[in-house]
Amino acid sequence: MVSLSMEIELTKTKKQKPAPNELGFGKYYTDHMFMMDYDNPEEGWHNPRIIPYQPISLDPAAKVFHYGQTVFEGMKAYRTSDERILLFRPQKNFKRLNLSNDRIDIPQIDEEFALEALKQLIQIDQDWIPTEKGTSLYIRPFIIATEASLGASTSTSYQFIIILSPVGSYYPEGIKPVRIYVESEYVRAVKGGTGMAKTAGNYASGLKAHSGVAGSGFAQVLWLDGIERKYIEEVGSMNVFFKINGKVVTPALTGSILDGVTRNSILQLLKHWNIPTEERLISIDELYEAYTNGTLEESFGTGTAAVISPIGELQWQDKKMIINEGNTGELSARLYNALTGIQNGEQEDVLDWMVEVK
Amino acid sequence: MVSLSMEIELTKTKKQKPAPNELGFGKYYTDHMFMMDYDNPEEGWHNPRIIPYQPISLDPAAKVFHYGQTVFEGMKAYRTSDERILLFRPQKNFKRLNLSNDRIDIPQIDEEFALEALKQLIQIDQDWIPTEKGTSLYIRPFIIATEASLGASTSTSYQFIIILSPVGSYYPEGIKPVRIYVESEYVRAVKGGTGMAKTAGNYASGLKAHSGVAGSGFAQVLWLDGIERKYIEEVGSMNVFFKINGKVVTPALTGSILDGVTRNSILQLLKHWNIPTEERLISIDELYEAYTNGTLEESFGTGTAAVISPIGELQWQDKKMIINEGNTGELSARLYNALTGIQNGEQEDVLDWMVEVK
């Protein structure tokens, strides 16, 4: 493990904090950031430091710009009503960061050290954690390849950075279902590719599909698999769930979809509640059949930003599926309340997920 | 078209130029770079400028770091023996840049203006064009998403940058065949994805596959398609050709492979020479059959960096194909000599490819 000694340089000019109702998502950043370097295998990751939030200065030939050698994570810290600071399953995020590192050929980080560094950063910027209902401090760890070389090969140097962003409630007017377009032209990822990693290229691939349907009032696209173009994979950048005939079904982790922390938590919570779950292949045809025979009861996306995003409508070619009359389902609401309640400390942490920043 | 007026700021301290035998590929950069901004659709691309080569300063939340919204191009300028400066089919590169832009949801650039800007940049840095045999000035135009926002959506702002790098001969000891490993675990791209665009994520996906085989003496991997895992796509980051029974076969542009400028030029040159060509699906099984029945005569990769890279050996699972006894084929050598001869101005530009920088 890298030594915990860390250089800390505090800012001399603290920024003004935005009003809680102006937060939005990922628009404002706190006063400090964490940074650490990698220049060669002998030295490994070194020079961990907390510094004032500032621009990154890179040679125009830095590999991250050209060959996308970069991975990231997303998680949240919450301020409880009794003034504690809680992180939601952060170990899983740093573990997944290393899985992504492995796929993108980036050196492994020390997960324990990363968590300690994050805690220290949050403590320094704790005044930035908003307290209004539904708000939180979004955490974005990411690693970028910095070698200034145009050879299309693995970088020899990297920076590991953590930035923090106070974010508003995803549902300022209450949880609300969205309309989703089933994408049939573009593909997000394929087995053997990078779909299971949290890496930039997966998201770049989806931008055009999203822009293409946003004008028609769709919040996201539903991705089908790249091979048979029939199995459901993800919705936008979230995992997806369907309640069919009392069972909760979600696509299995086949190699092209992300092993979401919220997905995993939902499955655990449902098992804890003795509600049957299935992780398996589910085709768009099966879904449409369940819709027509009346057994498609609810659907929702899951991710760190929204936690639960109910799906009220799915447009598949010329077929429209209105789910639960376009309203938030009972189970979707129960899961949202339970998960956010555990996260903000208002409900008992029955599955031992929360990690306190002391 | 954007006005041609361009702000030019010349460097006060010219860098020392590396010795010709130390150039390598993409290791050194010239004294200046081109830069242009995009901040909103009304203004479009604006503020074109040539400035001293310098680091790019970006907010840590810039979308290029997180969502890979970036595209690039690669081309070369040559200094002829009579002191002219020639570009090889640059219009095709800027046209492809716009095709990549379209796929990655980046605003279109003015191709004509980009070429004029490039010419101006090359003129300013023309002393950097190396003159030794096989050397050239590699040109890297690229666009990065700069909006400082963590929402996984299309950026509102961009920078378009061109950097120049003097590069050494790809074959300092003469053109030489490489060993290639047929990849069966990882996939580069799939139809519906971004494989036909020159964008970072395609390259990120390949880094681990390349690192995995480099230790065993393989120069690159041969990519198979992501759906059936049998049709040949590309080799490393090059297009690939096979001479089978007198015909030259290359994978068709099915949507997951790059429409290479060198690939296109090779096809044109072969037609000009009345050598039969085929752009079609070609499976690894067909290739192995051609190998066993003795009709696989030559194979080579094509790309801007190497121009022609002869393949002397293909390792597919436990099968080894030694092509042309591991030597550079006659046609491979003829194509290499013809293409590089046209590029460096020593041979007649029979197909009207070269553009002079005056």
Image (spheres, coloured by chain):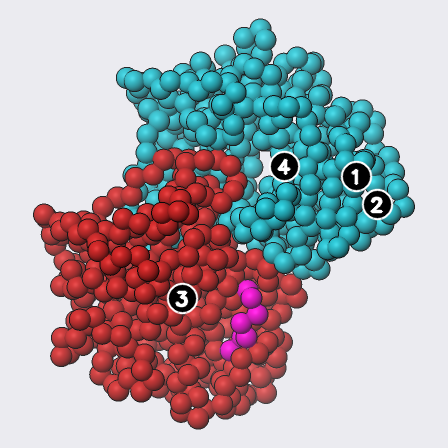
Chain colours: A red, B cyan
Tag 3 near tag 1, CB within 8 Å: no
Give the quarter of the image for residue B345.
Answer: top right
Question: Which residue, given by chain and number where applicable, does mark 2 sit on?
Answer: B291
Q: Give the SS element for disc 3.
A: helix
Label 1 lies in what chain?
Answer: B
Assess whether mark 2 and mark 4 are in contact (beta carbons under 8 angstroms). Answer: no
Q: Chain of mark 2?
A: B
Q: Are marks 4 and 1 on the same chain?
A: yes
Picture residue at 17% right of the left edge, 64% below the top = A123
Q: Nearer the viewer, residue B57 or A315?
A: B57
- Looking at the rendered structure, the kind of residue marked 2 is Tyr
Asked if the residues shown at circle 1 and circle 2 are in contact, with their CB atoms under 8 angstroms apart, the answer is yes
Report the residue marked by disc 3.
A95
Amino acid type, residue under disc 1 in the picture: Ile
Quadrant into which the N terminus of chain B falls: top left
Q: Amino acid at mark 3?
A: Lys
Q: Which residues are magenta?
A: A250-256
Whether B11 is drawn above or below B180: the answer is above
Density class for disc 4 (Cα within 10 Å; few <14, some 14-19, many ≥20) is many
Residue B308 drawn in magenta = no
* Residue A352, x across and y down, in percent: 31, 82
Disc 3 with disc 4 on a shared chain: no
Query: Which element is circle 2 on?
Result: helix
Callout 2 crowding tier (Cα within 10 Å): few <14, some 14–19, many ≥20? some
* Front-most of residues B186 and A274: B186
Q: Nearer the viewer, mark 4 or mark 2?
A: 2
Mark 4: secondary structure = loop
Secondary structure beneath label 1: helix
The structure residue drawn at horizontal position 74% and vertical position 25%, both measured from the top left corner, is: B333
The residue beneath circle 4 is B260
